[in-house]
């Protein structure tokens, strides 16, 4: 790889990082994290969960976890985490497609098992 190629890759990665950092999905995740951390009831439950885990109190632990799952701040955090994870997985899959010629949608009957013929045929990502 030439220094020029490496520089372009780094430049585009920085550009993608900046776009992601300012995206609605990441901003929603940050907001949900702040709201969850500022939710006194949620933090109290998290503290109780840690104590129950240390003491091995599984019945009480399950009850406290259920209460945590009922909180709006926790629900929003989980949704935001799932959305950001989905985006990162999609980005990874696109990169994987162009680097290795396999798509996340591939299975035993498709191009993932054909030793990169997709790349050799210059197929575009669906």
Image (cartoon, rainbow, N blue to C red):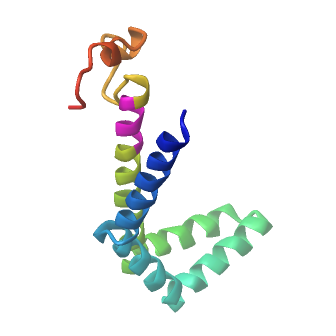
Taking the magenta stretch, the answer to whether it contains residue 110 is no
Please report the residue visible at 66 percent of the width from the left and 80 percent of the height from the top. Answer: 47
State the residue in front, 95 or 108: 95
Above or below, 103 relative to 54: above
In the rendered image, the quadrant that contains the C terminus is top left
Which residue is found at the position 38% from the left and 8% from the top? 114
Q: Is residue 7 left or right of residue 72?
A: right
Where residue 51 appears, as percent x and y from the top left, is: 73, 74
Q: For the stretch drawn in magenta, what is the main secondary structure?
A: helix
Left or right position of 77 against 52:
left
Q: Quadrant of residue 115?
A: top left
Query: Which quadrant of the view contains residue 98?
Result: top left
Would you say residue 9 is visible in this rendering? yes
Q: Nearer the viewer, residue 15 or 32?
A: 15
Residue 37 image point, x, y percent: 53, 84
* Residue 121 in the image: above or below residue 36: above
Stretch in magenta: 92-98
Placement of the N terminus among the 4 image quadrants: top right
Q: Quadrant of residue 92?
A: top left
Whether residue 47 is situated above or below residue 126 in the rendered picture: below
Can you see residue 79? no
Q: How far across and how far down the image is residue 88, in percent? A: 40, 51
User: In the image, what residue occupies the spot 64% across and 72% down?
Assistant: 49
Q: Which is nearer the eye, 70 or 86?
A: 86
């Amino acid at each position: 790889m030439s220094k020029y190629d490496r520089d372009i890759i780094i430049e585009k990665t920085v550009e993608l990082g900046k776009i992601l950092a300012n995206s609605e999905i990441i901003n929603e995740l940050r907001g949900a994290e702040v709201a969850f951390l500022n939710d006194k009831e949620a933090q109290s439950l998290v503290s109780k969960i840690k104590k129950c885990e240390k003491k091995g109190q599984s019945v009480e632990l399950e009850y406290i976890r259920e209460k945590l799952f009922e909180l709006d701040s926790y629900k929003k955090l989980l949704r935001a985490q799932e959305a950001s994870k989905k985006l990162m997985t999609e980005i990874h899959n696109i990169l994987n497609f162009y680097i290795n010629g396999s798509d996340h949608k591939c299975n035993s009957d498709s191009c993932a098992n054909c030793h990169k013929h997709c790349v050799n045929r210059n197929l575009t990502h669906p």
